[in-house]
Image: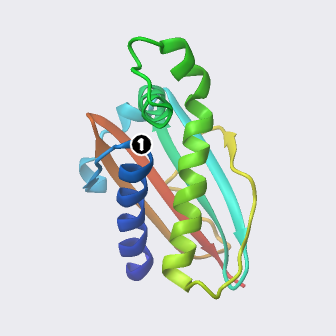
Amino acid sequence: MNGKNAIVLDGVCKLILEELAFLFCESQDATAFDYSQIDDAHEASMKFTGPKNGKFEIVAGRNLCMLLASNILGIEPEEDKEKAESYAQDALKEALNVISGRFLTEAYGEEAVFNLSAPVIGSVDDLSHVDENSEAENVLFFETEGYCLVVKLTIYKN
């Protein structure tokens, strides 16, 4: 785990989720993390290339994704559940996109140029798997509104 990246990513995740969706996150210890919260989960990922190459992943349960969508859209999830559900994956991808862009700027400066892939929805892989091609991996755990969220950053060897 890269300490500097973890600190920057932790701050960026909290800031972006607060500004984008009015969600106030608390960091969680990996040993105390409640994995049952992400059983019915969505995962979004995106890759980046530039001075460093890597991948961002975000995993959140279905209910948190619906809350994220509702807050971004400015609707009450109870009043328009169908709309919140239909935008849940898009909201997760948008959150990841903004987190990724902000992290890369904060960690590597405004002059560094990165190419970002579009975020995609995929299956939830084993987040504890260590990629043999990685130089560093950071897995962060958060809790917000009674829901859990995982963000993983993998930096590949150049």
Q: Which residue is mark 1?
A: 21
**x, y percentage for residue 67?**
41, 30
**x, y percentage for residue 23?**
33, 43
Q: Front-most of 93 and 37?
A: 93
Q: Is residue 136 left or right of residue 90?
A: left
How many discs appear? 1
Q: Is residue 36 above or below residue 143?
A: above
Q: Is residue 91 left or right of residue 37?
A: right
Q: Is residue 108 above or below residue 8?
A: below
User: For mark 1, does the 10 Å Cα neighbourhood hold few (<14), some (14 to 19), or many (20 or more) residues?
Assistant: some
**Quadrant of the rendered structure where residue 15 is?**
bottom left
Instruction: Say what secondary structure mark 1 lies in.
Output: helix
At horizontal 45% and vertical 35% (from top left) the residue drawn is: 68
At horizontal 59% and vertical 28% (from top left) the residue drawn is: 87
**x, y percentage for residue 40?**
49, 26
Does residue 150 appear anywhere in the picture?
A: yes
Does residue 130 appear anywhere in the picture?
A: no
Q: Is residue 119 left or right of residue 42?
A: right
At horizontal 61% and vertical 55% (from top left) the residue drawn is: 97
At horizontal 43% and vertical 68% (from top left) the residue drawn is: 9
The colour scheme used to paint the residues is rainbow
Residue found at the far front of this picture: 74
Q: Front-most of 45 and 2?
A: 45
**Quadrant of the rendered structure where residue 79 is?**
top left
Q: Quadrant of the C terminus?
A: bottom right
Q: Quadrant of the N terminus?
A: bottom left
Q: Is residue 137 above or below residue 92?
A: below
Disc 1 residue type? Answer: Ala
Q: Is residue 129 above or below residue 76?
A: below
**x, y percentage for residue 134?**
62, 74
